[in-house]
Image (cartoon, rainbow, N blue to C red):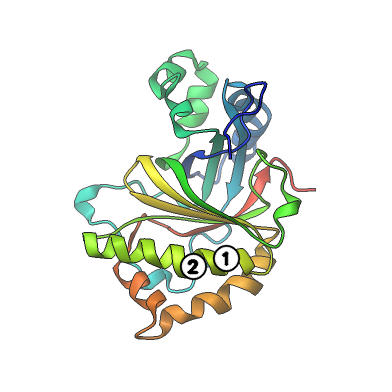
Amino acid sequence: MPLFDKQGKPKMDQGIRAVWYDLPEQGRDEYFAWLHDVHLPRVVAFPGIMWAASYEIPGGSNNVPFHDKMQRPPAADDVPTGSQFIVLAGAAHPHIFFRPSAEQINETETADAKEMVGRRIGSRLGIYSEVLRVDGPEAGTRLPGTAPAPAIQMGSFRTGTLEEELDVGAWYTNYRMPAIAKMHGVVCGRRLASIAGWAKHAVMYEYTSLQARMEGFHAHEALGSDDGEWTNRVVTYTIHSPGSPSVAQRMWPKVD
């Protein structure tokens, strides 16, 4: 499918910029008033940016089966540990996020904006290119090129060997993504490759609600507990970013 229409406007959001972070309890209302009313509308106004969205991760990373079983980065990698909130932006391709560069954007930020961003704790950045997308049964609830669905599950990870990388690629292609395409409550599923950031791979599943995700995903993921199952093997060797995968609900744009 072409990325742009005849007027040069993007049709597909194949580039995603994600920032995971924590916040102190004090001052959150002020921060989110700035983020949702000032900052993200400004982000959407940048040429090439199609959408922006803000998500909260209720309960941190406790909503994912086998979370404690997953490998994490070694301490020497010094990967930031933010896992309470995610800010996302979408563009036709990931290179949009490099013009202007992050440094150029920072130079134009107001003192208030710099102070607000400075409140983030453990901020972790990833810029990704979409390599595989499947539509789910609820695909019609999200217009093309608009913010992701009201609930998402987003994970980011590496593997340790080439053999594991080939195996996880085959698993997503032949097992996980076909299952996501048929799963209750799914709007869309994406597999992503990293352009910048610690994790080489990422995935994002979009759901109509957190409840729909729980009803559809948990039974499917239960295979991860069975020795000898493909899912069990993948869960064992993938090295996930702190808090990954994140199960989150959208704060902005507001869910109707």
Residue placed most toward the observer, 82 or 43 = 43
In contact (CB < 8 Å): disc 1 and disc 2:
yes
Q: Position of residue 20 (x, y in %)?
A: 46, 45
Q: Quadrant of residue 26?
A: top right
Question: Is 155 displayed left or right of 11 in the figure?
Answer: left
Q: Is residue 35 visible?
A: no
Q: Is residue 147 above or below residue 62?
A: above
* Disc 1 residue type (three-letter): Ile
Residue drawn at the location 63% of the way across and 46% of the way down: 148
Q: Where is residue 4 in the image (x, y as percent from the top left)?
A: 60, 29
Q: In this view, does 237 lie above or below 122?
A: below
Q: Where is residue 62 in the image (x, y as percent from the top left)?
A: 50, 67
Other-residue count near label 1 (Cα within 10 Å), few / some / many at <14 / 14–19 / ≥20: many
Residue drawn at the location 64% of the way across and 25% of the way down: 9
Any mark on residue 130, and which? none
Question: Is 142 displayed left or right of 63 in the figure?
Answer: right
Check disc 1 and report its element: helix, strand or loop: helix
What distance separates the C-alpha of mark 1 from that of mark 2?
Answer: 6 Å
Q: Is residue 254 above or below residue 219?
A: above
> Which residue lies under the disc numbered 2?
176
Check disc 2 and report its element: helix, strand or loop: helix
Any mark on residue 180, and which? 1
* Disc 2 residue type (three-letter): Arg
Numbered-mark total: 2
Q: Quadrant of residue 30?
A: top right
Q: Can residue 74 be seen in this view?
A: yes
Question: Is 98 displayed left or right of 182 in the figure?
Answer: left
Q: Position of residue 14 (x, y in %)?
A: 52, 40
Other-residue count near label 2 (Cα within 10 Å), few / some / many at <14 / 14–19 / ≥20: some
Q: In which quarter of the image is residue 197?
A: top left
Residue drawn at the location 47% of the way across and 70% of the way down: 175
Residue drawn at the location 75% of the way across and 52% of the way down: 141
